[in-house]
């Protein structure tokens, strides 16, 4: 009589173990599927062109031709493109994160007239797709301010709060910090700026890193804006350089794939360093809405 | 009497300085909202009513651009169809794929953090490099996918050079890229209270019933968020057309944003392109509105009807 639930528990445990086994197999299968294109691109970058066209194709290159990369670098000025990309990304990330923090702080903690209205305008602009303002902004930057072939139209917008979404993110994060902390500081005579720099900013560091990463990914993935604002080839970013390189070498797949792998590399390296923050940050956006 | 009068005065001085700090902090946002958002938005409307080409002085032509777009434009209809086709396919594919993977990752398996990282990797690669890389996998004669097809005895497919296959092929890449959705779903799943599942299991509910009646309702706010975000992103698709297809073959991947780009920056019809922009904006707004309107019918908020 008393054995029955015990047996049930045991069989439940066993069925759970088989379920976990099946899950693991599925996960490994899908993970390989996701990684496979990257491997295929990488293995192609190390092959001779005749080996690429061999049938059936081999999964692993016969001899690993790292010399392909040397050949690629003669035409594909990777280091220069990387530097150019960083000239856009670094100031954008710093300025965007800082101004988003200022604005988020004002919305989360300070009382001022017109708060409701400004907040509504801010949230409203979040729903406005970025491409809508593209043409007027292009006209304003190039005709109005004469900024042709310049990085400034790509960088300067980040000095204006880094986008409503990032302001929203910072505000939500600050709201989750107990107010008692800044109230105690107020009693000690600290002003609003002192509170921001000595209490709020240290507490919201994860959120600030997340905002910086979002700005990074946004610029990293952008092609359209870089295409319309940058003309001369010595100002090319990685995205522009690769697009152009592919146009030149349409059929030389091993060199094109070597250039592709080079373009992959910085993102992967950044990701491996900041993996924890990436995951934390994405999680944050999904749960704080 | 004096202290009573003093108190509000002091508070208001404090309040004043707080207000000053607030306005100082908000200067960047003010500038952004005015010059980067609302003025340009008005600009789109204004320019769309002119025949500006960037060379001559623009003339006011009323709604001519819109009339021309709807009656005589050779691309608009194809472009809208291509965009919606791509967006629906990509959003549906990536939602199902990422929820499925997130549910697998939510079980207690060894190396979960490692696998989560693997599924996220495509998201951190630069978009252009992804499309260039995949164009090799899709290559007509020696690409990997055509090797697979020939192995199982099927005919070769010109994945991105055939107007029938180009959209599904690009959508597959979009699904592959959906690592960020997986991470958000996974975080949501970890917030579903375990007691619900245990209670349902006691009542004899099987796995599928539990998924349908517990997991989905509890996850509905997050499903809504992911749906909204990926729909808005995918309706604005342009990078594959810029980097790979140039809108082709034919007009099969001439996405709306690419159409706008082509009109404004290749043909310099700025007024006309702004009219297109406004139509895209209206379509995006309509999709968003429908999603929000229907959301209260299928989103379940824990803690009852407090909205």
Image (cartoon, coloured by chain):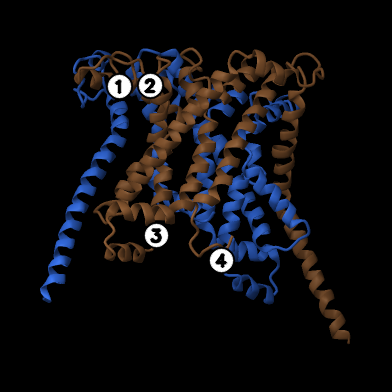
Of residues B107 and A4, the one drawn nearer to the viewer in this rendering: A4
Q: CA distance from mark 2 to mark 1?
A: 23 Å
A185 lies left or right of B195:
right
Quarter of the image containing the C terminus of chain A? bottom right
> Mark 3 vs mark 1: same chain?
no
Give the residue at mark 4: A177
Residue at position x 63%, y 14% from top? B73
In the image, the chain rendered in blue is A
Crowd rating for badge 2 (residues with CA inside 10 Å; few <14, some 14–19, many 20+): some
Q: CA distance from mark 3 to mark 2?
A: 40 Å
Q: CA distance from mark 4 to mark 3?
A: 24 Å
Which label number is shown at residue A67?
Answer: 1
The quarter of the displayed image where residue A4 is located: bottom left
Can you give x and y, in whole percent of width and height, for residue B8 in the image? 82, 76
Of residues B296 and A139, the one drawn nearer to the viewer in this rendering: B296
Judged by depth in the image, the label closer to the viewer, 3 or 2, is: 3
Crowd rating for badge 3 (residues with CA inside 10 Å; few <14, some 14–19, many 20+): some
Q: Chain of mark 4?
A: A
Give the residue at mark 3: B192
């Amino acid at each position: 009589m008393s054995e029955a639930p015990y047996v049930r528990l045991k069989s439940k445990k066993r069925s759970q173990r088989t379920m976990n086994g099946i899950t693991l197999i599925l996960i490994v299968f899908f993970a390989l599927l996701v990684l496979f294109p990257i491997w295929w691109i990488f293995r192609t970058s190390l092959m001779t062109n005749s080996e690429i066209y061999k049938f059936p194709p081999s999964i692993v290159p016969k001899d690993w031709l790292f010399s392909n990369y040397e050949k690629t670098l003669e035409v594909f000025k990777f280091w220069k493109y990387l530097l150019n990309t960083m000239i856009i990304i670094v100031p954008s990330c710093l300025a965007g994160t800082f101004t988003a923090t200022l604005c988020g702080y004002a919305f989360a903690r300070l009382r001022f007239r017109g708060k409701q209205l400004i907040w509504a305008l801010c949230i409203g602009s979040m729903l406005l797709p970025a491409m809508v303002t593209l043409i007027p902004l292009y006209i304003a930057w190039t005709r109005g301010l004469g900024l042709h072939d310049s990085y400034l139209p790509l960088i300067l917008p980040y000095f204006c709060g880094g986008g409503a979404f990032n302001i929203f993110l910072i505000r939500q994060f600050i709201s989750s910090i107990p107010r008692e902390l800044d109230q105690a500081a107020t009693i000690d005579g600290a002003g609003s700026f002192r509170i921001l720099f000595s209490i709020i900013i240290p507490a919201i560091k994860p959120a600030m890193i997340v905002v910086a990463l979002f700005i990074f990914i946004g610029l990293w993935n952008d092609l359209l804006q870089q295409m319309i604002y940058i003309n001369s080839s010595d100002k090319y970013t990685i995205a522009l350089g690769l697009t152009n390189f592919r146009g030149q070498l349409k059929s030389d797949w091993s060199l094109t794939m070597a250039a592709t792998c080079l373009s992959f590399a910085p993102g992967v390296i950044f990701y491996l360093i900041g993996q924890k923050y990436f995951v934390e940050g994405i999680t944050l956006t999904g749960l704080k809405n | 009497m004096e202290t009573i009068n003093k108190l509000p005065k002091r508070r208001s001085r404090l309040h004043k300085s707080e207000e000053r700090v607030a306005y100082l902090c908000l200067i960047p946002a003010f500038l952004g909202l005015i010059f980067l958002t609302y003025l340009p938005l008005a600009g789109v409307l204004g320019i769309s009513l002119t025949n500006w080409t960037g060379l001559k002085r623009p003339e006011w032509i009323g709604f001519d651009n819109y009339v021309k777009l709807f009656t005589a434009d050779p691309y608009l209809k194809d472009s809208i169809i291509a965009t919606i086709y791509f967006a629906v396919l990509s959003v549906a594919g990536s939602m199902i794929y990422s929820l499925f993977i997130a549910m697998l990752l939510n079980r207690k398996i060894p190396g979960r953090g490692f696998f989560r990282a693997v599924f996220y990797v495509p998201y951190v690669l630069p978009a252009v490099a992804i499309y260039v890389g995949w164009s090799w996998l899709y290559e007509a004669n020696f690409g990997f996918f055509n090797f697979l097809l020939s192995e199982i005895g099927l005919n070769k497919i010109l994945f991105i050079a055939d107007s029938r296959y180009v959209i599904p092929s690009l959508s597959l890449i979009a699904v592959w890229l959906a690592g960020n959705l997986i991470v958000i779903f996974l975080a949501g799943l970890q917030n579903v209270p375990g007691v619900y599942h245990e209670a349902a299991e006691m009542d004899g509910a099987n796995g599928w019933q539990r998924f349908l009646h517990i997991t989905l309702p509890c996850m509905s706010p997050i499903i809504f968020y992911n749906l909204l975000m990926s729909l808005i992103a995918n309706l604005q698709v342009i990078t594959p057309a810029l980097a790979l297809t140039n809108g082709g073959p034919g007009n099969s991947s001439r996405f709306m944003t690419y159409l706008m780009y082509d009109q404004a920056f290749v043909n310099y019809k700025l007024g006309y392109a702004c009219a297109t922009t406004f139509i895209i904006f209206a379509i995006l707004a309509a999709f968003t509105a429908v999603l929000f309107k229907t959301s209260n019918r299928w989103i379940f908020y824990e803690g009852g009807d407090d909205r």
